[in-house]
Amino acid sequence: MVSRTRRFFMGGIAGAAGFLALPGRLLALTNASAEALIDKVVADINRIINSGKSEPAMIRDFKGVFDRYGDNSYIAAYAMGVDARRATGTQKRAFSEAFGHYISRKYGKRFREFIGGKIDVKGVKKVKTWHEVDTTVRLRGKAPFQVVFYVSNRTGRDLFFNMFIEGVNLLLTERQEIGAMLDRRRGDIDAMIADLRKAG
């Protein structure tokens, strides 16, 4: 079994190196196109949080946001980290499917906390091979706070591959969560995937 510390360290190096070595077409991504993507994301989230729908219906809608605008294959691969090297193709596919539903439930519930509020895009800047789009969440009776999206066109499409909610990094948080699930299951990938289907 890969230790959690080594898993996190090695996976982080591999993930960062892989992302920095992305194809040259990423250079075509501009501040304007990155901001346009997050404008769509924010518009959809604002519509969902003010729709008055039930929680299960809202979670389904949030999954649609991740499916349309998120680089889910990269997010899932980063979360699994170095353990992906010993996973079978079937396990990788099962993990990716379970992870997509898990992350939609988890972050959909977080966005649902914004009901009655509004998210505004404030600015964008280029960082290495991706762009950071800064947004502000304004809730009634609470101080505004920041949500930052990382956008790339690694796949040939403009998609977000990470976000920070009040400084909490989605990619690193989920790598730690998946690592902890694997540790609890003594490295059993199938058992971790079964747990993931119920988590979030």
Image (tube, grey):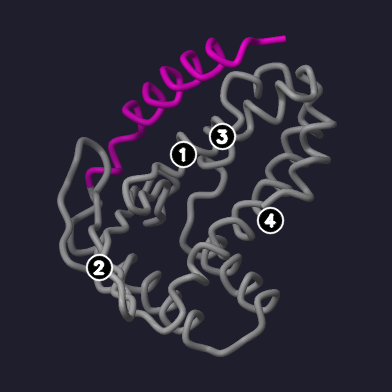
First in sequence: mark 2 vs mark 4:
4
First in sequence: mark 1 vs mark 2:
2
Find the distance from the CA under tag 2 to the CA under tag 4.
Answer: 28 Å
Mark 1 crowd level (few <14, some 14–19, many ≥20, 10 Å Cα): many
Q: Amino acid at mark 2?
A: Pro
Q: Quadrant of residue 159?
A: bottom left
Mark 4 crowd level (few <14, some 14–19, many ≥20, 10 Å Cα): many
First in sequence: mark 4 vs mark 1:
4
Q: Which residue is mark 4?
A: 101
Whether residues under marks 1 and 3 lie with C-beta atoms below 8 angstroms apart, the answer is: yes
Q: Position of residue 18 (x, y in %)?
A: 41, 25
Viewer-side label of 2, 4: 2
Q: Which residue is mark 2?
A: 144
In the rendered image, the vertical position of residue 56 relative to residue 134, given as above or below: below
Q: Secondary structure at mark 3?
A: helix
Q: Which residue is mark 1?
A: 171
